[in-house]
Image (cartoon, rainbow, N blue to C red):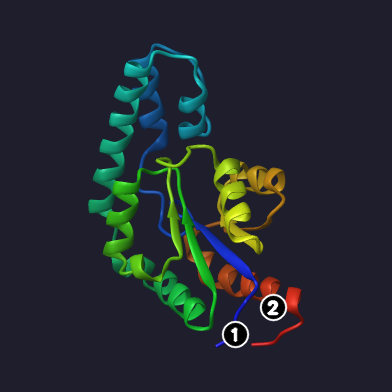
């Protein structure tokens, strides 16, 4: 087993699994509850930053949590089988894996249990720690002190990685994850001049 000197950080929605939440509809519901016209992009960070009454925000988070829970039921393990295998292969050769998401810890745990990946992670970072992606990445970088390679699917992920000074590899679709994990491992290996 190779001990890689970097942490592989993988986003959940759109990266590890397909997007199973209608975010446009969810944003509309949250806007109605809050009485705002904010674009709410990205949703979790925007909600966190809005200068609103905490009880209103709790109501909005509750609506989001409900949509997240509902999405777990629609997740097909078969559809992400190759992603699961790619992660298992990576961990088997010594890759340290951290999952990051703006989901709640509760719904993230349900997903990882359903995919049988919970015990393979070094850590799971959710909005319960912070709903700000750049802060999540900075936390990982400070905690582990190694090179961080972050795999995500949005421009917001890419911007957060740049701001946190971590490597970023983008998936265009969750189906790209196995190839992107392999590329990310090579980024880690290049750092050490090692070979698989």
Q: CA distance from mark 1 to mark 2?
A: 9 Å
**Does 117 sit above or below residue 106?**
below
Place residue 31 in its image quadrant. Answer: top left
Q: Nearer the viewer, mark 1 or mark 2?
A: 1
Disc sitting over residue 189 in the figure: 2
Q: Are marks 1 and 2 in contact (CB under 8 Å)?
A: yes
Q: Which residue is mark 1?
A: 2
- Look at 62% across and 74% down and name the residue there: 185
As rendered, which of 57 and 145 lies closer to the eye? 145
Measuring from the top left, give residue 42's x and y in whole percent: 52, 34
For label 2, the SS is: helix
For label 1, the SS is: loop
- Look at 55% across and 88% down and name the residue there: 1
- Is 152 positioned to the left or the right of 190 in the image? left
Disc sitting over residue 108 in the figure: none
- Look at 47% across and 82% down and name the residue there: 92
Place residue 29 in its image quadrant. Answer: top left
- Is 80 positioned to the left or the right of 188 in the image? left
Instruction: Say whether disc 1 or disc 2 marks the residue closer to the N-terminus.
Output: 1
- Look at 46% across and 72% down and name the residue there: 87
Q: Quadrant of the C terminus?
A: bottom right
């Amino acid at each position: 087993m190779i001990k890689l000197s970097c942490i592989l950080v993988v986003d959940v929605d759109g990266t590890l699994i397909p997007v199973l939440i209608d975010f446009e509809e969810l944003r509309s519901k949250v806007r109605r509850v809050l009485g705002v016209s904010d674009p709410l992009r990205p949703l979790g960070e925007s909600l966190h930053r809005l200068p609103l009454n905490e009880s209103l925000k709790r109501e909005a988070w509750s609506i989001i949590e409900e949509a997240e829970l509902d999405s777990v039921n629609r997740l097909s393990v078969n559809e992400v089988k190759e992603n699961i295998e790619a992660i298992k292969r990576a961990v088997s050769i010594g890759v340290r894996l951290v999952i990051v998401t703006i989901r709640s810890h509760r719904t993230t745990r349900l997903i990882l249990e359903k995919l049988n990946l919970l015990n393979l992670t070094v850590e799971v970072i959710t909005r319960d720690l912070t709903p700000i992606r750049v802060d999540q990445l900075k936390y990982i970088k400070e905690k582990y002190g190694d090179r961080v390679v972050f795999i995500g699917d949005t421009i917001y992920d890419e911007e957060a990685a740049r701001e946190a000074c971590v490597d970023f590899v983008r998936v265009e679709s969750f189906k790209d994850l196995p190839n992107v994990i392999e590329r990310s491992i090579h980024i880690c290996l290049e750092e050490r001049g090692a070979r698989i």
